[in-house]
Image (cartoon, coloured by chain):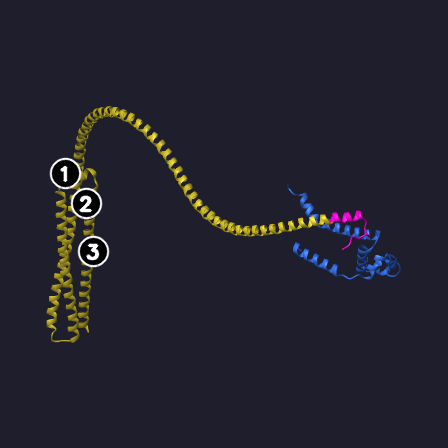
Amino acid sequence: MNNFEFKKIRSIINLQEKLQPKTYLDNLAESGWLDMYLDNYSKERFTNDKEYKERVFESMYNYSPEVNEDVEIYFLEQLCESMSYFIEYTKECRKQKLYDPK
Amino acid sequence: MQETKAIRPEIKGLFDTIKQQAALYTESFDMLESHRESYMQLVKEINELADGFTLKINHEIFNLKQKYDSITKILTIETNKTLEKYSELNDLKNLQASYESALTNINLLIANVEKNALTLKRDRDEFSREISYFKNKVNEEIEQIANYNHELLKELVAVEFAKKDAENLSKVKLLESRILKLEQSLWNNNDLVNRDLNKIYKDMDIFKSVLSTMSKADNSNYTRQIDIIFDNLSKLELASASINNQLYMLQNKINKEVSVFDQRNTLDTSSQTITAFFGKDYEQEYKKLTNRLIALENLCSGLSTKNTTLIITAYSSIAIALLSILLAFVL
């Protein structure tokens, strides 16, 4: 993927975010009842459905009124995962840099 | 989009720094990508160039190989030629060395020959002197020996000539006596034959007269027998004539041989003395003469035997004729 394509995809995602309507999960996260909802009504789905889990944490990230450690851990895990992927991805480059004669 | 409150600001700062670094990384990756692309392009160009160069180099290598092969062949040919020339030069060098050694040898030989020529000249003078001295001496010696031998030869020739003359005279006398004897025997035989023939003729005349008296009887058988007898008589006459003829021829031959012998005896005295001295020709001639005399003797003896047989047959035929006449009278 070149730079132009990457920017185009990025703008499309931004547009999608702007056009996205407010869901019930967003409302629950804004009111501070989402944790309780998940524990009582959709715990199994939360643990098994990965997409659902992403949507839940997305809502928490956007509409939560206070600091939530689970969201932090989740995004940090995501970050760790991305970083590890990045590290793995750039491993060859770093190796080559190590063998650079300069 | 509003600021989130679910995450603490430290973590947000962390995310921001990561975001900035990600942006930087993106830029650097973009740059890297562009560099990679340019690098790939460069590599591609380089590869194309390398392919071109490879093709060109292969072509050049092939040309070089061909040139190398041709040059190698030329070099091998030239090397062989130079080796041949080198070997020829070596041979020439060896030949030159041998010629030089031969030249030195020839020079040495010339010096030796000059020395030897001088010595030979000296020796030749001495030898000519010695030869002249020896020649004179030898001539003197030869003259002396020749004189001595001449006298000795003269004496020997005289002695031998006398001996051979005596022998020849004795042999001639013997031959003459033999020839006389043979002539006498021949003439005796001839006389005997003539006498017998005369007797037969006389008898035949008597017989003819008797027959004429008996002509009255005129018997055919008698006349036939008488004819046969006359035929036999005529044959006898012919035989006696041939014998006489042979005797005459024999006499002629003997006379010829005697004349030849006399001629041989009256040859040049010098040649006779030489043959008498060396002995070969004379002996051969003597042998020839003796052989001829022996042949004449044999011929005479053969003629005498022939004469006797003819006489015997003549007598026997006459006796048979008389017996037949007598028997005719008796019957």
First along the sequence among labels 3 and 2: 2
Q: Name chain B's colour.
A: yellow
- Neighbor class of circle 1 (other Cα within 10 Å; few <14, some 14-19, many 20+) is few
Quadrant placement of the C terminus of chain B: bottom left
Mark 1 lies on a secondary structure that is helix
Residue A19 shown left or right of residue B221 in the figure:
right
Badge 3 and badge 2 both on one subunit: yes
Residue B276 location in percent, x, y? 18, 39
Q: What is the spatial separation of the Cα atoms under label 3 and label 1, in whole angstroms?
A: 41 Å
Label annotation for residue B270: 1
First along the sequence among labels 3 and 1: 1
* Residue underneath mark 2: B285
Label annotation for residue B302: 3
Residue B94 location in percent, x, y? 39, 35
Q: What is the spatial separation of the Cα atoms under label 1 and label 2, in whole angstroms?
A: 16 Å
Kindly identify which chain the residue marked by label 3 belongs to: B
Residues rendered magenta in the picture: B1-18
Quadrant placement of the N terminus of chain B: bottom right
Amino acid at pointer 3: Gly
First along the sequence among labels 1 and 2: 1
Amino acid at pointer 1: Ser
